[in-house]
Image: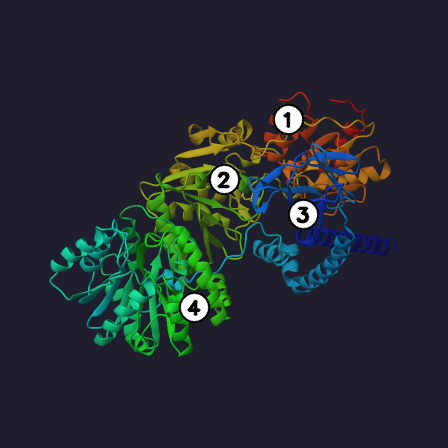
C-alpha cells in the first residue's frame, strides 16, 4: 500500500510541477506579446488652453508608454507619489507653436504597466498643466487582448505538443527551435529560405537567345559630369549591335549639347539625335524616341544618363525577351532601383568608383533565373517590341517623370505580359542627378497617388514581392560581395547563435560600432529555423537568408575572400561537433581567425561546465581527458577537444573577457596560452548609482534571465525556503526558462530595460542584488550592471562573476555548493540585519 501511495504522490507532484511550468510559460507569453494601444487626449493648461496632445497610450513589453507632444517646458510625470522628469526627445516640426518661429517637442514616458495612476505636470512661467492619465479604456482593451492571446496560446500548445514531447524527452535542439519560434520567443526575426539549387548551380543549363540588335534610348537633361562615362560604357561594353537614340531635352547646362554634337559626329555606328527646342520633360522626350524605336522591331533599352553599364551587358539584359514573347520588360540588379536594390531591398546605396564592374562580375557568374516582378524600373529597362507596339507611349500625365514605367508595366500585365528582374546583371544607378533629390521625392509622392488610383492592387503586389523576395538568393550573394568591397579592412564574419544573452549583446554592440563607421558586418548564425542563417548588415539595413545545406552556406561565404572569421558562440546547433572543421573550410590562406570565449564551448559541449547534476564539479575532468573517460551530452570529451585543437592552432587570437576565463582556458589548452588576450566587455548602458531604499525589510533583486546555468534551480529552492519563513522579499527582473516555475513567494516582474533600474528599485524597494549563476561566467553583464548601482551584490564563488564582485566594497561572495546548499547559504545571508549602504 505504501509504495502505491508514494507513486500517487509522485504523479501528483509531477503533474503539479508541469502545470506550474505551463502557467509560467503562459505568463511569459502574455508579457512578451501583449500590446494594447489607445488614442490619447488633448493636453490643456489649467486655464483651458491647448498646449499639447497625448498621441497614444500603449502597453508593450511589460511597460506603459505615454507618448505625445508639448509646447512648454518643465515636464514631470507623477506616479504613486513619486515624480519623474520628462525628457523632450524629438523636435516636432509638424507641430507649430504659438508663433511662426516656435515648434512643439515630442516626449515619451515609460512606466511599469501595472502602475494604476499617473499625472503629467508641466510648468513654464505662469503656465501650468495637470493632466490625468485615464486608463479605463486601456484596461478594457487589455482584457480583450489577454482573451485573444490566451486562445492563441492554447492553440499553439496543442499544435506543438509533438515538439514539446521531443524536447522534454531528449532536449532536441531542433524541437527547441520549433517551440521557440511557435511561441514567438525567438531573439531573431524570421528569414526567408535560400534557393540551394541556385547557389550550387543545380538549375540545369541556361540557354540564352539573342536578338540581332537592340535600340538604346538615352534621354539627356543636364548631369553632364556623368554623361561621357555613361555613353562610353553603353557603347564600349555592349556585346550586341547597337542603334542609339539620344534625346537632348534642352539642358540648362551649356556644356551638354556641344559635347553631344561632337560625340555623335565621332561615332561610326547609327546614332539618332533628337534635339528638343524646349524642355519637354522626361516622359515626352522618351515618347519621341519610342516613335523612332518602334520602326526597328527589336528590343528597346531605356537607359538614364546616370546609369553605368558593365561589360557584356546587352545580351544578359535582353535574354529574357528573346526567350519568352510574354516578357514585356527586363530590369537588372542595381544599387539604386527600389525592388532590385543591392545590398538591401528598396534601400539605395552609393558605390565607390569601379565597384560596378566588380559587383557585376559576381552577378554574371550567378545561376539565378529571371523572376517576375510587379514593375520594371526605368533607369535601365529593356522593352519587348511586341508590347511597345501595343503601348507605344508613356502616359504624359506623369510629366517630368517617376511612375510612368510603372503605369506602362501594369498595362502590360493586364495584356498578359510579365515584367522580370534579371539577377545575372548589375548596373550602377547614380540616381537623382537629373531632377535633384528633393524634386524627386515630390514627384514620386504626386505620381504615386495616380498609380494607386489606377491600379488599386499595385501597392499590395509590391509589398508581397518585398515580403517574399523572389531574388533573395542572388541579392544575398551580391550583398556578400558588396560587403567585402565596401569594407576597408577584411570584412568580419561572426559565427553566432540565435539565443540572445550576453554574447548577442556583445555582437549587437560590435555591429552598431561598425555601422556607425559605414562599415558592413556579416553574421553566420546557427539555431534559427534552419541550421544556417546568413546576415549582411549595412547602414541601410540587413539582408538575411537561411538554409539547411552546409554546402550551400559555404558556397555563398566563399564569395567573400577578404575576411576575418570570428567565432562567438554556436549554442543550439544541431551538430556542433562539426563546427570547428566547417570554420576551417571557410578560411583561406590570408583569412584572420579569432575565437571569443563568450562561454567554454571550446572545452566542453555543455559550454558551461554544468553537468547532468546541474552543478559545476570543477575543472579537473576537463584537463587532458582520456578517450572514453567522460561523456558530455553524448559526446566523448576527448574527441570534442580533439576537434577543436586544429581550430585553436589556426586561430590568430583568442579573446577572453575576464582573467578567470583566460585562466580556465589556459589550464585546458596550455599550448595556446600565448594567444589569449583579456579584453573586458564595455557595458552598452551603465546604470547610475542608486540610493538604497529606506526600509527595514530586505528585498533581493535578481537581474537577468534564468535557466539552469544562470541559477534557476537555486532561485526556485530559495523560494521554497521562503515558504517556511518569509524573512525577506525576492523579485526576478527577467524571464525564467519554462522548465522551471517560480514559487508564489517570489515576485516575477519579467523583462526590464536597463534605463528603468532606478524606477524598479524604488517600486520593489530593492535593497540587494543576487547573481545566482551556478557555472563560471566568462563575463556577466548583469553582475556589472548590479555593481554599477552601488547596492550590495552577492554571488557564489566561481567564474568572472566572483572575480568582479570580490573587487568591490559592497560585494559578497558565498561558498559554492549544490543548488540546495546555495539556496540555504543565500537564505542565511539575506536574513541577517540590513546594513544601509
Image quarter where the N terminus lies is bottom right
- For the residues labelled 1 and 2, the Cα–Cα distance comes to 26 Å
- For the residues labelled 3 and 2, the Cα–Cα distance comes to 56 Å
Disc number placed over residue 374 in the picture, else none = 4
Which colouring convention does the figure follow?
A: rainbow
Percent coordinates x, y for residue 601 in the rendering: 52, 41
Percent coordinates x, y for residue 97 in the rendering: 61, 43
Residue under label 1: 805
Crowding near pointer 4: few (<14 within 10 Å), some, many (20+)? Answer: many
Residue 348 seen: no
- For the residues labelled 3 and 4, the Cα–Cα distance comes to 40 Å
Between marks 3 and 4 in the image, the one whose residue lies nearer the viewer: 3
Residue under label 2: 602
Front residue of 810 and 93: 93
Seen in the picture, residue 154 relative to 347 is either above or below; the reply is: below
Which one is earlier in the sequence, the residue at label 1 or at label 2? 2
Percent coordinates x, y for residue 820 in the rendering: 75, 37
Which one is earlier in the sequence, the residue at label 3 or at label 2? 3
Front residue of 579 and 423: 423
- For the residues labelled 3 and 1, the Cα–Cα distance comes to 46 Å
Amino acid at each position: 500500500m505504501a509504495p502505491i501511495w508514494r507513486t500517487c504522490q509522485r504523479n501528483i507532484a509531477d503533474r503539479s510541477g508541469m502545470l506550474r511550468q505551463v502557467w509560467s510559460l503562459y505568463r511569459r507569453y502574455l508579457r512578451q506579446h501583449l500590446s494594447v494601444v489607445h488614442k490619447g487626449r488633448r493636453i490643456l493648461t489649467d486655464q483651458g488652453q491647448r498646449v499639447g496632445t497625448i498621441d497614444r497610450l500603449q502597453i508593450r513589453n511589460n511597460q506603459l508608454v505615454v507618448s505625445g507632444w508639448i509646447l512648454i517646458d518643465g515636464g514631470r510625470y507623477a506616479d504613486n507619489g513619486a515624480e519623474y522628469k520628462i525628457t523632450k526627445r524629438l523636435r516636432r516640426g509638424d507641430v507649430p507653436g504659438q508663433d511662426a518661429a516656435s515648434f512643439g517637442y515630442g516626449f515619451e514616458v515609460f512606466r511599469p504597466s501595472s502602475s494604476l495612476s499617473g499625472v503629467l505636470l508641466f510648468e513654464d512661467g505662469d503656465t501650468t498643466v495637470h493632466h490625468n492619465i485615464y486608463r479605463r479604456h486601456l484596461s478594457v482593451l487589455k482584457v480583450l487582448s489577454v482573451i485573444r492571446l490566451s486562445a492563441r496560446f492554447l492553440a499553439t500548445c496543442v499544435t506543438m505538443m509533438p515538439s514539446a514531447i521531443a524536447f522534454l524527452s531528449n532536449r532536441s535542439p531542433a524541437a527547441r527551435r520549433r517551440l521557440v519560434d511557435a511561441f514567438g520567443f525567438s531573439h531573431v526575426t524570421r528569414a526567408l529560405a535560400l534557393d540551394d539549387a541556385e547557389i550550387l548551380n543545380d538549375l540545369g543549363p541556361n540557354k540564352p537567345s539573342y536578338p540581332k540588335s537592340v535600340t538604346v534610348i538615352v534621354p539627356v537633361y543636364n548631369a553632364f559630369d556623368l554623361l561621357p562615362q555613361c555613353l562610353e560604357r553603353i557603347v564600349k561594353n555592349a556585346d550586341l549591335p547597337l542603334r542609339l537614340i539620344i534625346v537632348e531635352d534642352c539642358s540648362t547646362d551649356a556644356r551638354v549639347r556641344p559635347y553631344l554634337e561632337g560625340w555623335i559626329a565621332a561615332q561610326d555606328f547609327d546614332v539618332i539625335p533628337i534635339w528638343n527646342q524646349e524642355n519637354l520633360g522626361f516622359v515626352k522626350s522618351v515618347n519621341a524616341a519610342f516613335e523612332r524605336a518602334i520602326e526597328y522591331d527589336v528590343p528597346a533599352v531605356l537607359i538614364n544618363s546616370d546609369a553605368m553599364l558593365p561589360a557584356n551587358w546587352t545580351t544578359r539584359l535582353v535574354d529574357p525577351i528573346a526567350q519568352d514573347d510574354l516578357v514585356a520588360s527586363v530590369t537588372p540588379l542595381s544599387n539604386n532601383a527600389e525592388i532590385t536594390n543591392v545590398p538591401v531591398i528598396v534601400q539605395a546605396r552609393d558605390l565607390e568608383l569601379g565597384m560596378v564592374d566588380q559587383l557585376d562580375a559576381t552577378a554574371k557568374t550567378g545561376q539565378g533565373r529571371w523572376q517576375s516582378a510587379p514593375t520594371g524600373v526605368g533607369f535601365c529597362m529593356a522593352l519587348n517590341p511586341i508590347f511597345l507596339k501595343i503601348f507605344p507611349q508613356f502616359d504624359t500625365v506623369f510629366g517630368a517623370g517617376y511612375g510612368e514605367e510603372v503605369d506602362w508595366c501594369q498595362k502590360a500585365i493586364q495584356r498578359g505580359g510579365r515584367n522580370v528582374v534579371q539577377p545575372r546583371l548589375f548596373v550602377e544607378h547614380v540616381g537623382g542627378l537629373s531632377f535633384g533629390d528633393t524634386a524627386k521625392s515630390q514627384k514620386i509622392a504626386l505620381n504615386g497617388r495616380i498609380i494607386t488610383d489606377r491600379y488599386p492592387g499595385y501597392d499590395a503586389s509590391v509589398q508581397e514581392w518585398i515580403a517574399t523576395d523572389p531574388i533573395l538568393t542572388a541579392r544575398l550573394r551580391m550583398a556578400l560581395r558588396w560587403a567585402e568591397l565596401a569594407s576597408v579592412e577584411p570584412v568580419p564574419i561572426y559565427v553566432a547563435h540565435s539565443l540572445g544573452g550576453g554574447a548577442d549583446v556583445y555582437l549587437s554592440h560590435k555591429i552598431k560600432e561598425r555601422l556607425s563607421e559605414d562599415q558592413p558586418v556579416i553574421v553566420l548564425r546557427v539555431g534559427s529555423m534552419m541550421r544556417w542563417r546568413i546576415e549582411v548588415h549595412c547602414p541601410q539595413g540587413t539582408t538575411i537568408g537561411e538554409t539547411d545545406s552546409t554546402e550551400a552556406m559555404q558556397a555563398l561565404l566563399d564569395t567573400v575572400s577578404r575576411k576575418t572569421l570570428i567565432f562567438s558562440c554556436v549554442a543550439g546547433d544541431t551538430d556542433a561537433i562539426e563546427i570547428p572543421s566547417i570554420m576551417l573550410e571557410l578560411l583561406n590562406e590570408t583569412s584572420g581567425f579569432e575565437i571569443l570565449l563568450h562561454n567554454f564551448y571550446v572545452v566542453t559541449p555543455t559550454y558551461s561546465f554544468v553537468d547532468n547534476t546541474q552543478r559545476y564539479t570543477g575543472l579537473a575532468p576537463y584537463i587532458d581527458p582520456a578517450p572514453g573517460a567522460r561523456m558530455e551530452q553524448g559526446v566523448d570529451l576527448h574527441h570534442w577537444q580533439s576537434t577543436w585543437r586544429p581550430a585553436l592552432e589556426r586561430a590568430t587570437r583568442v579573446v577572453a573577457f575576464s582573467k578567470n576565463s583566460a585562466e580556465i582556458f589556459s589550464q585546458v589548452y596550455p599550448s595556446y596560452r600565448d594567444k589569449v588576450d583579456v579584453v573586458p566587455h564595455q557595458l552598452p548602458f551603465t546604470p547610475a548609482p542608486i540610493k538604497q531604499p529606506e526600509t527595514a525589510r530586505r528585498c533581493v533583486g535578481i537581474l537577468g534571465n534564468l535557466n539552469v546555468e544562470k541559477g534557476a534551480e537555486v532561485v526556485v529552492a530559495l523560494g521554497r525556503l521562503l515558504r517556511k519563513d518569509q524573512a525577506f522579499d525576492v523579485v526576478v527582473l527577467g524571464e525564467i526558462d519554462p522548465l522551471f516555475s517560480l514559487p508564489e513567494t517570489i515576485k516575477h516582474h519579467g523583462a526590464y530595460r536597463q534605463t528603468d533600474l532606478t524606477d524598479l528599485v524604488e517600486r520593489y524597494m530593492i535593497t540587494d542584488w543576487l547573481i545566482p549563476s551556478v557555472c563560471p561566467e566568462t563575463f556577466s553583464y548583469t553582475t556589472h550592471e548590479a555593481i554599477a548601482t552601488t547596492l550590495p551584490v552577492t554571488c557564489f564563488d566561481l567564474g568572472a562573476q566572483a572575480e568582479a564582485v570580490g573587487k568591490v566594497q559592497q560585494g559578497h561572495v558565498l561558498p559554492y555548493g549544490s543548488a540546495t546548499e546555495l539556496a540555504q547559504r543565500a537564505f542565511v545571508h539575506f536574513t541577517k540585519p540590513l546594513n544601509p549602504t
